């Protein structure tokens, strides 16, 4: 969610009281043993899924399920949807909920953690998504702070409301909402009050300094600290002890899975080489718009390169450059 971006697709607003009444006693959730530090399963590469579209511009739910299957084949630890890289602000209420259902079905039996994005511009909108997500029993949720918040108190109330819906891990994203810094002190205090919120997707300001500061509060109340931004800082973040990366880039899910495996195995040379090759093709994101969708189509995950952000066309010269850089990654990719 980005300030100055398109308004989030209109949601049918219902109140917090209506949501909780609909859930009944299940809404009054207790502290779950899931949050015990030795049971934390939120680690590794969690891929934010892209949203595929048909040539007519409708969400392609078949390809969305294919993307989940591809990520499972690649061996990543989890999938997340929808977030900014999923074009969440361009999705309607109905598309998001049908997407939840499609992904939940496709993810059954894969062993991957499933995290649903339930953010909205205000608490009522978020609660609608959270109730729909909770009914599908994901492993966790993520909620970007609401753009309508004007204080840390407003942000706290937003997460308090979410934690009345779910006792599962809730990732708190530190950027993308209002122009308010979620300070380290605030995050620690929030996680102390709401154990679900001990999972941080850190993207604000001097990111690595903040990550190191948060690690000082692990494993309780902070349970996981994740990086983002396509994993462009992930090599360093792994080496300073963060728990994983949550990022768009599912077209390279096998590469992210390999990076985590190489780190776990202590293979420093291969880790550095694989990471360097990934950065090489990521460099094209600003040079050839839509390159990631081209890779999605080229690898047989999506049928089209359609996007609601704009139309993408690729010259032969651009395709040759993409293929040249992609060749370097092939030793780390599944066939």
Image (cartoon, grey):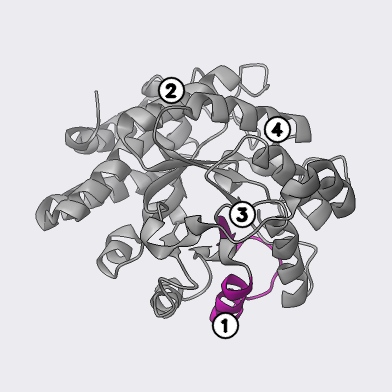
- Which element type, helix, strand or loop, lies under badge 4? helix
Q: In this view, does 271 lie to the left or right of 203?
A: left
- Which element type, helix, strand or loop, lies under badge 3? loop
Find out whether residue 171 is within the magenta segment: yes
The disc at residue 97 is 4
Which residue is at 77% across, 48% downward? 25
In this view of the protein, can residue 96 be seen by the observer? yes
Alpha-carbon neighbours of circle 4 within 10 Å: few (<14), some, or many (≥20)?
Answer: some
The residues bearing labels 1 and 3 have C-alpha atoms spaced at a distance of 22 Å
Magenta residue span: 170-193
Q: Name the residue under label 3.
A: 167
The disc at residue 185 is 1
> Mark 3 or 4 closer to N-term?
4
Mark in the foreground, 4 or 2:
4
Say which of 145 and 305 sits in front.
Answer: 145
The residues bearing labels 3 and 2 have C-alpha atoms spaced at a distance of 33 Å
Q: Looking at the picture, how far across and down is residue 66, in whole percent?
A: 47, 22
The answer to whether marks 3 and 2 mark residues whose Cβ atoms lie closer than 8 Å is no
Query: Picture quarter containing residue 268?
Result: bottom left
The disc at residue 301 is 2
């Amino acid at each position: 969610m980005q300030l100055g971006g398109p308004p989030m697709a209109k949601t049918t607003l219902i109140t917090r009281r209506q949501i909780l009444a609909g859930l009944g006693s299940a809404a009054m959730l207790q502290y779950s043993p899931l949050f015990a530090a030795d049971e934390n399963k939120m680690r590794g590469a969690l891929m934010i899924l892209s949203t595929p579209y048909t040539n007519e511009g409708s969400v392609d739910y078949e390809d969305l399920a294919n993307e989940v299957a591809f990520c499972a084949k690649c061996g990543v630890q989890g999938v997340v949807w929808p977030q900014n890289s999923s074009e969440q602000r361009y999705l309607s209420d109905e598309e998001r909920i049908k997407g939840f259902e499609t992904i939940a079905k496709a993810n059954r039996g894969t062993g991957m953690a499933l995290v649903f994005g339930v953010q909205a511009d205000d608490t009522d909108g978020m609660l609608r998504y959270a109730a729909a997500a909770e009914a599908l029993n994901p492993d966790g949720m993520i909620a970007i702070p609401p753009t309508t918040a004007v204080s840390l108190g407003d942000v706290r109330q937003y997460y308090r409301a979410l934690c009345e819906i779910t006792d599962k891990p809730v990732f708190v994203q530190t950027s993308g909402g209002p122009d308010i810094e979620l300070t380290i002190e605030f995050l620690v205090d929030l996680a102390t009050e709401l154990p679900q919120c001990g999972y941080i997707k850190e993207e604000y300001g001097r990111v690595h300094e903040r990550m190191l500061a948060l690690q000082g509060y692990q494993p309780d109340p902070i349970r996981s600290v994740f990086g983002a931004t396509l994993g462009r800082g992930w090599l360093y973040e792994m080496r300073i002890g963060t728990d994983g990366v949550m990022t768009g880039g599912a077209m390279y899910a096998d590469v992210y899975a390999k990076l985590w495996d190489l780190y776990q195995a202590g293979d420093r040379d291969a880790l550095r080489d694989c990471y360097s090759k990934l950065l090489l093709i990521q460099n094209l994101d600003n040079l050839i718009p839509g390159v990631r969708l081209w890779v999605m189509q080229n690898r047989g995950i999506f049928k089209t390169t359609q996007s609601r952000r704009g139309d993408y066309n690729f010259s032969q010269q651009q395709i040759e450059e993409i293929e040249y850089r992609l060749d370097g990654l092939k030793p780390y990719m599944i066939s």
